Image (cartoon, rainbow, N blue to C red):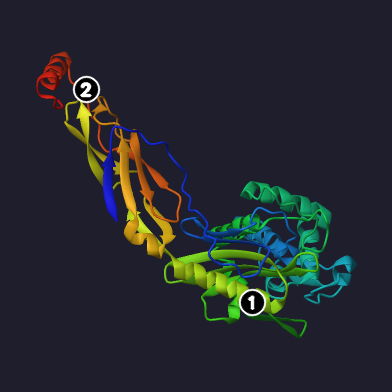
Amino acid sequence: MSFERIAPVLAVLLTLAAGPAKAIDTGERQSILIDYETGNILYSKAADEVMYPASMTKMMTVYMLFERLKNGSLSLEDTFGVSEEAWRKGGSKMFVKVNDRVKVEDLIRGIVVQSGNDATIVVAEGLAGSEAAFAEQMTRKARELGMNQSIFRNASGWPDPEHVTTAADLATLAIATIRDFPDYYHYYYELSYTYNEIKQSNRNPMLYKDIGADGLKTGHTEASGYGLTASAVRGNRRLVMVANGYESVNARATGGERLLDWGFREFENYALFKEGEKIIDAQVWLGDEKTVPAIVGKSLVVTIPRKSRAQMKVTAKYQEPLPAPIAAGAQIGTVEITAPGTEPVSLPLLAATDVQQLGPVGRLGAAFQHLVWGGGN
């Protein structure tokens, strides 16, 4: 890694982003792979293309359950009644019985592990009165989370031409689930659950592989193909993946594993700066100090291809000399990190201390010195 100072140019502040790579294709129609800590997109394929989420919809139903558990308006021991509509619902089932009352914790497992369409209707009716009303709440929650292309028409992912999302939106939901509910996320990596003496295994194929996977949800309809939202942890890194449109169960299992393996193998996280770390001493013009320490205001970890590490360059960009007065915390430039295969990453460069302007006599002397010697103050 090299370090370079460039003056007198003031850089334009860029957004924290990494360029998605295109070096692998596992046969899916839409996909995205994101580093959880940095938010960098490692891989993207039609990630903003509207698609059908199928049972990956259930992540939003569970998110809304978790939200109520976290804010205390619901407990794991609370129960919801089973309507005839929920009992009759086809597809994958938890096998609830009409007129029974089912505990919230059982319903969570029935949705996450067993992918029960019946369980989602029980939850929707219990929380909102009807599945249609709950679907409207799901769409509103999607907007709050930044899932701007998602529209929900039911709680299960049952086929509906207006029930749509994108791979990028589902990744946003997965990340929010992991981030917002650390006390409840463990339900996503339970391998099996038995309800009404019927044992069912989790449909997520990543959980049965030794790849660090701990969630989240599969989906399948004829229109959507086979889909998977998954997350895995290796060492101190977590990746989140959404891949949809596989042609078979086996293609989904092998493709998902290969995409996660590729992300862990080809990329690495590098901690570059700690909050408040001094980057450089910047020259000051007409100040009571000749220099001011320039620091970064927050820590920075970047995700870049491992092969690009040796060619990483860190560049401090600011106008030199900086005219006094300068207030502590004021932005005086940027620090830019570049590496092959990624887009630039920038942080504001901040003044660590106040620098006062010299008085009239001092400014006059400094100006004279500059004319005679070409120096600073």
- On screen, residue 31 above or below 281: below
The local secondary structure at tag 1 comes to helix
Q: Is residue 251 left or right of residue 41?
A: right
Residue 298 appears in view: no
Residue 2 picture location, percent across and down = 28, 53
Q: Is residue 283 left or right of residue 298?
A: left
Q: Quadrant of residue 259?
A: bottom right
Query: To which residue does mark 1 refer?
Result: 253
Residue 246 picture location, percent across and down = 70, 70
Callout 1 amino acid:
Ala
Q: Residues within 10 Å of mark 2 (few under 14, many from 20)?
A: some
State which quarter of the image contains the C terminus: top left
| Front one among 144 and 229 | 229
Q: Is residue 225 left or right of residue 365?
A: right
Callout 2 amino acid:
Gln
Is label 1 or label 2 in front?
1
| Front one among 219 and 343 | 343
- The first of marks 1 and 2 along the sequence is 1
The local secondary structure at tag 2 comes to loop
Residue at point 33% right, 51% down? 313
Residue at point 51% right, 75% down? 212
- On screen, residue 241 above or below 197: above
| Front one among 13 and 146 | 13
State which quarter of the image contains the N terminus: bottom left
Number of on-image labels: 2
Q: Quadrant of residue 183?
A: bottom right
Query: To which residue does mark 2 refer?
Result: 357
Residue 81 picture location, percent across and down = 81, 67
Q: Quadrant of residue 82?
A: bottom right
